[in-house]
Amino acid sequence: MRVLFFGLLRDIVGCAEDTVQMEGGTLRTLFDQYAARFPKLTGLASSIVLARNQSFAPLETPLEHGDEIAFLPPVSGGASDSPYTHLIEDESGNFFALTRVPIDVQSVNRRLLAGTDGAICAFEGVVRNNTKGRATQFLDYECYEAMAVKMMAELGREIAGQHAIGRIAMVHRLGRMEIGEASVLISVTAPHRRPSFDAALEGINRLKKLVPIWKKEHFVDGEVWVDGEWDDSVVRATGASTPTGTSDPS
């Protein structure tokens, strides 16, 4: 089976992808094998989430030949002629995408807007020049792309069903971003302004805790993966047993 590592976890194990041969077993078994090799994983277990075939999965999930398993640290949050590397657009006109070029806000808004709309709320998250006074040079974003756009679509559709809106779009940029550039866009159209504000706010707040996207902040004197946190609904790896020869830091 194929095992993927992202963000800080990739640095810990020293690779982005590994291949494992296992007969039976569960996600817990797999986690324990890697934790025995890389004890730092045990200390991070309470914030690590595992995914099987691009969906969040609990530790007792059985493994099968050909599975794709991803080890995910806490989230920070097409066609060749398209600016989008992954894109989902549903029958209702909701739009979810990843891109490696600057986000074209007006293009996204035009894509959503209908004659019945009286408001459009567009939230842009931009790169600031410091973190707690420490000067930032630039940011790097990476993600589990196939799962990220799938999760964005699930999240966006859920929000659309809970608010009196027309359509919602979520677009996240990946790769290197300079100070002042937009890393994420949440756009919402609605007949009236209040639902568009509420849906956009919920969209960015939940995206940052549910969608597997991570950022590395680069400074003059170093770099660091930015700490984040998963939503309370997501099952962590904290229930994995402690490998022999290591102690439980809790």
Image (cartoon, rainbow, N blue to C red):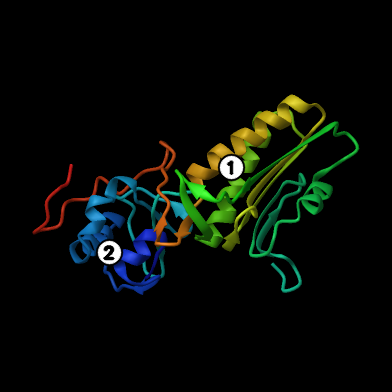
Q: Is residue 77 visible?
A: no
* Total numbered labels: 2
Q: Which mark is residue 24?
A: 2
Task: Tell me the quadrant of the picture where the C terminus can be found.
Answer: top left
Does 20 sit left or right of 183 as displayed? left
**Horizontal and vertical percent for residue 55?**
47, 53
- Which amino acid does the dot numbered 1 rest on? Leu
- Which amino acid does the dot numbered 2 rest on? Gly
Q: Is residue 38 above or below residue 109?
A: below
The residue lying furthest to the left in this view is: 245
The numbered mark, 2 or 1, whose residue comes first in the sequence reads 2
Dots 2 and 1: beta carbons under 8 Å? no
Tell me what residue is drawn at x 85 percent, y 34 percent: 117
Q: Secondary structure at mark 2?
A: loop
- Foreground mark, 2 or 1, reads 1
**Horizontal and vertical percent for residue 64?**
36, 64
Q: Is residue 137 above or below residue 194?
A: below
Does 85 sit left or right of 207 as displayed? right
**Horizontal and vertical percent for residue 88?**
68, 55
Report crowding for label 2: few under 14, some 14 to 19, many 20 or more residues within 10 A (C-alpha).
few
Report crowding for label 1: few under 14, some 14 to 19, many 20 or more residues within 10 A (C-alpha).
some
Tell me what residue is drawn at x 30 percent, y 67 percent: 13
Tell me what residue is drawn at x 37 percent, y 69 percent: 65
Q: Nearer the viewer, residue 1 or 218?
A: 218
Q: Which residue is mark 1?
A: 155
Q: Is residue 60 visible?
A: yes
Q: Which mark is residue 28?
A: none
